[in-house]
Image: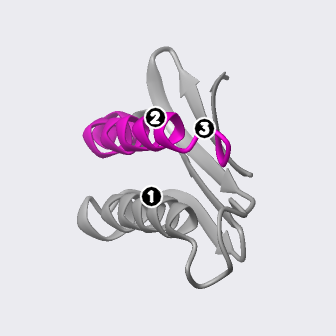
Amino acid sequence: MIQVTFAVESKIITGFEVSGHSGSSEQGSDIVCAAVSSAAYMTANTVTDVLDLNCFVTADDGLMILKLSKEEAEKAQDILNGFLLHINALSKEYADFIDLKISEV
């Protein structure tokens, strides 16, 4: 199962962690993993390369973590909220494969 956790501080999304594999299909043809991975990478790339914000980001097999200071996160709310909306929709469509959590920090 894919775990997606959003960190929220005073109603501001300050980051997210995506971990695990959906197991909905064989590796390489798993559309659930592909959808989540693509959205996560687009979000991270937009935050770092388009908005040019200073953040911590790491990605490895089955793991992506992005963390922003509250000040930097305020500048990225549109893209982070868009990612949250997208993951929320995917988690409803593929409830057996995606677990979404919101963590107040």
User: Could you classify mark 2 by the number of other residues whose Cα lies within 10 Å: few (under 14), some (14-19), or many (20 or more)?
Assistant: some
Mark 1–mark 2 distance (CA, rounded to whole Å): 26 Å
**Against 87, is 101 above or below?**
above
Q: Is residue 56 left or right of residue 13?
A: right
Q: Which residue is mark 1?
A: 54
Nearer-N-terminus badge (2/3)? 2
Residue sitting at 49 percent across and 33 percent down? 92
Q: Amino acid at mark 2?
A: Asn
Mark 3–mark 1 distance (CA, rounded to whole Å): 33 Å
Residue sitting at 36 percent across and 35 percent down? 85
Q: Which residue is mark 2?
A: 88
Which disc, if any, is residue 95?
3
Q: Is residue 19 left or right of residue 29?
A: right
Q: Nearer the viewer, mark 1 or mark 2?
A: 2
Specify the farthest residue to the bottom. 28
Q: Which residues are magenta?
A: 73-98
Residue sitting at 45 percent across and 16 percent down? 11
* Residue 6, horizontal then vertical, whole percent: 58, 36
Mark 2–mark 3 distance (CA, rounded to whole Å): 10 Å
Q: Nearer the viewer, mark 2 or mark 3?
A: 3
Residue 79 counted in the magenta span: yes
* Residue 64, horizontal then vertical, whole percent: 63, 62
Q: Amino acid at mark 1?
A: Asn
